[in-house]
Amino acid sequence: MQVKDRNRNRRNIGLLALIALVLQLGIAPAITLGLGHPNFMFVFAAVVALSIGGQTGVVTAFVAGLLMDLSSTGPLGLSSLLFCISCYVLGMEVRDRIAEEPGMTVIPFAVAALGVSLCYGIAMLLYGASESLLEAIVFRALPSTLLTILGYLPFLFVMGRAGAGPLRGGGGKHRSRYTLGNR
């Protein structure tokens, strides 16, 4: 029998959100490659989606996107929309993919980060913040994707080594004597 500890999930999501917000506001503006910056709020949303998924992942993605929009010069709601769509797809299985197969989460995360960066870059081109499509894609979206993937790797390393990840609170691969089913 698995017991869900909702308070532990909320506490750990809050701590992870605080870390991501500090990284996004304090460190991300200083890290540049071309015109791109890492998107730690998307990393946070994707980690929750890959660890918990479902409704929690989508709500977390919406809040993370809203915080991202409030801290940037882009249109309000764009990041929320992009984060919600990508985290819905990432968290569709509603299982802790990071604890089960941490290395296999890099590819779906990279594809989602590329999709978010490309859509955001094209939207910023339409919004008037970019000069050309080349600038929006090659100099903003692709470097942002690379930096975001590099920002995801430490989170993946810490959560993958923790077994079940800090969002689940233990129990991942390790069987308990209270587990029902075949032994």
Image (cartoon, rainbow, N blue to C red):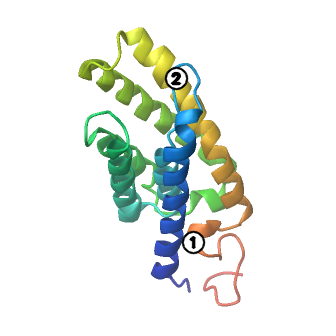
| Towards the viewer: 93 or 136 | 136
Place residue 79 in its image quadrant. top left
Of callouts 2 and 1, the N-terminal one: 2
The mark found on residue 142 in the picture is 2
Disc 2 packing (10 Å; few <14; some 14–19; many ≥20): many
| Towards the viewer: 14 or 157 | 14
Residue ID at (36%, 28%):
119
Q: What residue type is labelled 2?
A: Leu
How far apart marks 2 and 1 lie (CA) works out to 32 Å
Query: How many numbered dots are placed on residues in this image?
Result: 2
Q: Which amino acid does label 1 sit on?
A: Arg
The outermost residue toward the bottom is 178
Q: Is there CB contact under 8 Å for labels 2 and 1?
A: no
Image location of residue 93, percent across then percent down: 46, 58
SS class of the residue under badge 2? helix
Q: Quadrant of the N terminus?
A: bottom right
Q: Quadrant of the C terminus?
A: bottom right
Image location of residue 59, percent across then percent down: 34, 60
The mark found on residue 61 in the picture is none
The mark found on residue 168 in the picture is 1
Residue ID at (65%, 62%):
99
Image location of residue 84, percent across then percent down: 34, 48
Residue ID at (35%, 16%):
130
Foreground mark, 2 or 1? 2
| Towards the viewer: 8 or 98 | 8
Disc 1 packing (10 Å; few <14; some 14–19; many ≥20): many
Q: Is residue 126 left or right of residue 88?
A: left
